[in-house]
Image (cartoon, coloured by chain):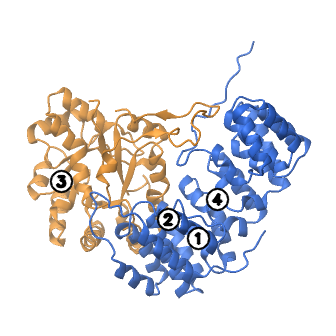
Chain colours: A orange, B blue
Amino acid sequence: MSDFRFFDPHAHMTSRTTDDYERMSAAGVRGLIEPAFWLGQPRTNVGSFVDYFSSLVGWERFRASQFGIQHFCAIGLNSKEANDEGLAKDVFEILPRFALKEGVVAIGEIGYDEITEAEEKAYQWQLEFAREHDMVVMVHSPHRDKKRGIRRSLDVAKEIGIDMQKLIIDHNNEETVKDVLDAGAWSAFTIYPHTKMGSQRMVDLTKEYGAERFIVDSSCDWGVSDPLSVPKTAKMMIEQGVPEEDVRRATYQNAVDAYGQSGQIDFEALEAKPSIDQRQLFHDNSVLRGQEAQVSDEVPN
Amino acid sequence: MTTTANPPELARIDEWLRNALEGAPTSGRSGAQAATWSDGQVEAILETPLSPDRFSQVLSMASRYGPRGPLAPSERMVAAAEGLVPGWNPERWTALEALRVRLIVAQARSDAEGLPAAIEEAFRYADEGELCALYRSLQFLPGPERFVWQAQEGCRTNMKTVFEANGCDSAFPAAHFDDVAWRQLCIKMLFVEAPLWRVSGFDSRVDDELARMALDLAEERRSAGRRIYPELWMCLGTTADPRALEAIESELSGSDELSRKAAILALGRMGNTERLSEIERDGGSLFGQIAQWALMGRHAADAFASVSPPEGAEPSTFDSPSIDTPA
């Protein structure tokens, strides 16, 4: 496992602490994607969205870089808040300001929650925006009525004319995976401690289907979740005899390929082992400061 | 507060940027889309007056279609920059920053009156890289008093990259910050371990109050058992009061090589030739040499480069005080 590196394409880091960044870095997570979502309670004005989107392309990116992790993001109006139609209209006015910025790899996470008309309108508007700007789309699938929600997500995306190669459907399970793969989209799985998928189920699915177009993520956020889901699942896969190549694809390469279509991921920089070495550029390296320098030759895997 | 004699000529700034961009080492972005703006496309964008909305969009899009890598201007170009705007040092700029600053300068030329609104809007929606370019551009803009609040806001950022883009290598802070903002900028440079020696015009604005703040900070660090930032000694300027001398002597008797070098340079700034001659005589090959240089007048802000934190280093998060166990 020591030479494995990981890419977690769904992690809500604004809700996590630096301890999490440290642990992720130590476990070999080289990059991650933070999709815009809700805050656990509804926002009441568009200014909250401006500041939130702004933090995804600003402070949070900087914070991640301090731990040797490349931070990308997806910009979108989530399905829950799409139901506040007045607010949604305001959000769509400012969304283009952020969606085309550096390091924005997709429109997302968007899709359905209760599968209402308002959600559908917001989903369609954002799909059209993505198509016009040739962007990748990250789709959140609903907790309730998931199967129908996913089928509808796929159908509407097709109607709008989204290239299935550029569509990632997230939070899949055993019941939905076939629909997504048959449509030609990428099938992502969220590994959660109590809900969504567990690691063992993910191992079993990979044994059954192989790893083509499979993407494993943690979706760690402000709820009970685990920022180390991706490396932990990879470890279980290896222990249970899933071919190494499949493990690499599901926990790194597929996500990098899918979101790399945005042109925003520098593959070589991601491959290169990050170093957090404060000594390397010292003008006079014979003497360090009074305190111990924070040095590690590479982020250990 | 010093004031610049004449506002910089925007046409000449633009010319400098265009030349520098032409000479920048081309570096592709592997794995990225090949689509880049051609020279013709860039010129077309530059020639069109943009609404504030469109202006901030174009600043963003520059990251998708603009150049990558360092600007790496030649020595001749760096000297030319200093000639155009004293205090401007573009050595560490990226090519993308130069392109973005060209866009900002073009906006200033095409709509001087509407500029504050356009700049305010661009700041409001800026990401990390755009913020750096925006702050770097402030030194060129007409009516600089209109952007002072924004530049002072830049001192309050938590992103070290943005803080340095605002505070270092730019003519703006020394020329336009009031005393409170100026001193906060300088002392925060030390706190976040950013290079204070790269704050342009530093030596022209050292005063007794900055020296007092620096000495208070040195005492706080000492009480906490923490190392004193070597560049802190720059702040003493020509103030040779007993408290400053005592602090310097205390540093000279310590074991930290960089701090001792900085303390010797500080003596030079105070004109304390007597003490420097002693060190020159007794200080051995390393410290004696520094004292000799200080006696020769090599103690301006840029002499402190050799004791500054490494470029790109983050503040040490684990800066724990040493704990003395009770006997």
Residue beneath disc 2:
B73
Instruction: Please state the chain letter of the residue tagged with numbered disc 4 in the rendered image.
Output: B
Whole-Å distance between the Cαs marked 3 and 4? Answer: 44 Å
Q: Quick one: which residue is furthest to the right in this view?
A: B242
Relative to A273, is B122 on the left or the right? right
Look at the numbered disc 1 and give the secondary structure of its residue: helix
Same subunit: marks 3 and 4: no
- Residue A242's image quarter? top left
Assess disc 4: are there few (<14), some (14-19) or many (≥20) residues with their C-alpha within 10 Å of its C-alpha.
many
Residue beneath disc 4:
B155
Residue beneath disc 1:
B81
Look at the numbered disc 3 and give the secondary structure of its residue: strand
- At label 1, which amino acid type do we have? Ala
- At label 2, which amino acid type do we have? Pro
- At label 3, which amino acid type do we have? Trp
The answer, for residue A194, to whether it is visible in the render is no
- At label 4, which amino acid type do we have? Cys
x then y, percent, for residue A98: 41, 67
Same subunit: marks 2 and 1: yes
